[in-house]
Amino acid sequence: MLGVNEIASVITNEGLVRTLRDGRHASALADGWEWIAADVLRIHLRRDARFQDGDKVTAGRAKASLDRSRHDSVQSQLYPTLRDIAAIEVEAGDWIRVRCARPTAFLLDDLEVPIRKWDTRGQPIGAGPYLTEETRRDGMILRASRHYFRGHPQIARIHLKTYRSLRTAWAGMMRGDIDLLYEVPSDTREFVEQESSVALFSFLRPYVYTLVLNHTRPMLRDPAVRAALNYGIDRQALIDRVLHGRGKAATGPVWPLHWATRRDAPGFAFDPFRANALLARTNGAPMELTGSADRMPARLRFACVIPAGVSPHEELAIALQKQFFDLGVDMRVEPLPIPAFLERLSSGEYDAALIDLNGGPGLVRLYLFWHSQGYWKTGYSAADEAIDTMRSAPDDNALVQAVSKGQRVLTDDPPAVFLAWPETTRAVSRRFEVPDVDGDLIKGIWEWTLRP
């Protein structure tokens, strides 16, 4: 679940471009762009765009913000194609020209990076509909910006507040202290939707629950072993049992709603016979056919680290463990406090890890997590060529073909076990009129109005 800072970032910042649910791109601080070469993009800035202090978002300030982001170690990891930018030039008429070191079809995905300026104290000033007024121990207070280019938000202030439990938060909503419950767990949705004073809004979340496999481990190095683990999982049973039917089975790491995705792309259907056959003929992984007093007989053993106390990761891990048990695979679950969990991931000291990974709505996350030069270090490189082909695609037709090839590679030599894209539900007081939204209603909160 996102923290308060991440939620606040969504509504206090604005990028040049927005990526829609289907992976297409729409205007934000930029109202137009054109590729004048495979490696050169011209971007036109809106003339009415303002920062939260009233200053105009000029081409020069946009260039300065992009330059700062592409040279920042954290931002350049989160938005990896910014590293492809060789130079940014300001042109007359509110245009900037972005020259890349190579053709970069993913660049528009990463132009969602916030455009900001900095005050004399070094504090960032964004161009989103809200700005941070106060940070408190229990959360944050945001104030509407008078200078937001799409219009003045109707809600003057937003108090983002954390609660220790859903029960406490729900009680606050029933008292009228809370107008938005950010996330309604799937196992409580039927209870919540009985409350007439609350409206529920659900959407497929662009994060995929994934069993990440460390390819540097000898027992997970063989593609046949990883394929066997994929065929041995009944994803729909996991969704029905753990997510209460609210999710979509994952065929791979490509966002299923992306316009370039093949709906008939190859994937892993539940096939325990094929999984058993693959494990039986695998020579590269050590198989242990006998057990001991404290261990079940198994053909494959590995440990899976999970973030302790985080739902539904623990429930998913237990359900996975049971399905693997039926396959003769012993997956030991190791819950870790979140700091220790993240440390193990960054150091590579794990066999497998269960995590929900950002997989959309653009394609750049494929590079971030599944390219050998990306952020995620698992020892996997089989999809490098396919992802590079996507990244350098000169037009839509070429991108469709490249995505199709990438989906085949990621099935033939899977880097992980991709489980499910979960459905997320938000609960909103019926005091508010919420416009139709493409996906997450939080991004359009500046348009909410109070009912008469």
Image (cartoon, grey):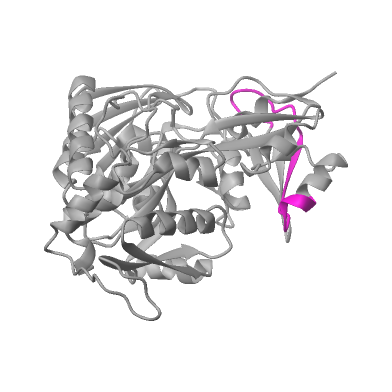
- Left or right side of 328 for 151: right
Q: Position of residue 229 (x, y in %)?
A: 29, 53
Q: Residue at x 18, y 45 (%)?
A: 383
Q: Nearer the viewer, residue 93 or 262?
A: 262
Front one among 223 and 91: 223
Residue at the right extreme, as displayed: 175
User: Looking at the picture, how far across and down is residue 253, in whole percent?
Assistant: 33, 41
Per the image, is 165 magenta? yes
Residue 211 located left or right of residue 50: left
Residue 131, located in which quarter of the rendered image? Answer: top right
Residue 219 x/y as whole percent: 22, 66
Residue 427 drawn above or below residue 401: below
Whether residue 162 appears in magenta in the rendering, the answer is: yes
Which residue occupies the foreground of this view, 192 or 229? 229
Up/down of 433 relative to 136, above or below: above
State left or right for residue 204 relative to residue 222. Answer: right
Q: Residues in magenta?
A: 146-168
State left or right for residue 303 relative to residue 190.
left
